[in-house]
Image (cartoon, helix red, strand yellow):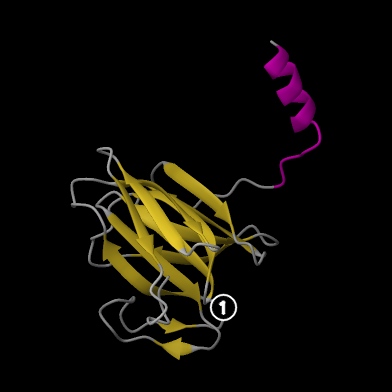
Amino acid sequence: MIIDIITKQCLKRYRQVATLERHQAPVNCLAFAREGGVFASGGDDQKVVLWDIKSFKPSQTLTDQNGRWGQITCLQFIEGPTGEVLCFGTGRGSIVMFKRSKRSVSIRTQWYNMGLNKKKGDFAEISNARVFPPSDSVECFDYCKINQRFVMTSHFGMVKMFRFDGSKSDSL
């Protein structure tokens, strides 16, 4: 009863400004970029949608054309040693990382959407690593910038921790 009263009082301070629709299946996770301007959503449709906060429209949709990701189970923007990175866990045991592009590029490799031109400010994949077996989804993760540690959990109860290797400039 007391929690209901407190919740209602807090919600009175906010008003709904938009209903955003792009996913074709349940949405599992959301995160605001620390740099502002966008937030990301990920779901069972195996997509991450980046939303423009001002226009309420999708600015970019990230997909894996090879179908390796499975559902998007968790995501967050983290401040790594090389800048802000969008990281997300998948239903097939992978951690995927995207970084905002500082220039326009034409991407023609197997790791990116084939033959698509990326605009300045679009996110481009920098890492896709299987950290658990394909049958064991990534459930959550966190990154500690101070200690340069990345920790993640799996659906079947495994916890793994990684330390940043400074010799690889494009990865956390």
Give the image location of residue 37, x and y in percent.
66, 65
Q: Amino acid at mark 1?
A: Gly
Q: Main secondary structure of the magenta part?
A: helix
Q: Toward which corner of the image does residue 120 lie, by quadrant?
A: bottom right
Q: Which residues are magenta?
A: 2-17
Packing grade of label 1 (10 A; few <14, some 14-19, many >=20) is some
22 sits to left or right of 127:
right
Residue 80 locus on image (x, y percent): 52, 69
Asked which secondary structure carries label 1, the reply is loop
Q: In the rendered image, which residue does mark 1 sit on? A: 121
Can residue 44 be found in the magenta stretch? no
Q: Give whichever of 165, 32 is nearer the camera.
A: 165
Residue at 69%, 10% in the rendered image: 1
Q: Quadrant of residue 170?
A: bottom left
Task: Provide residue 30's location: percent of width, then percent of height.
Answer: 52, 49
x and y, in percent, of residue 146 in the image: 55, 63
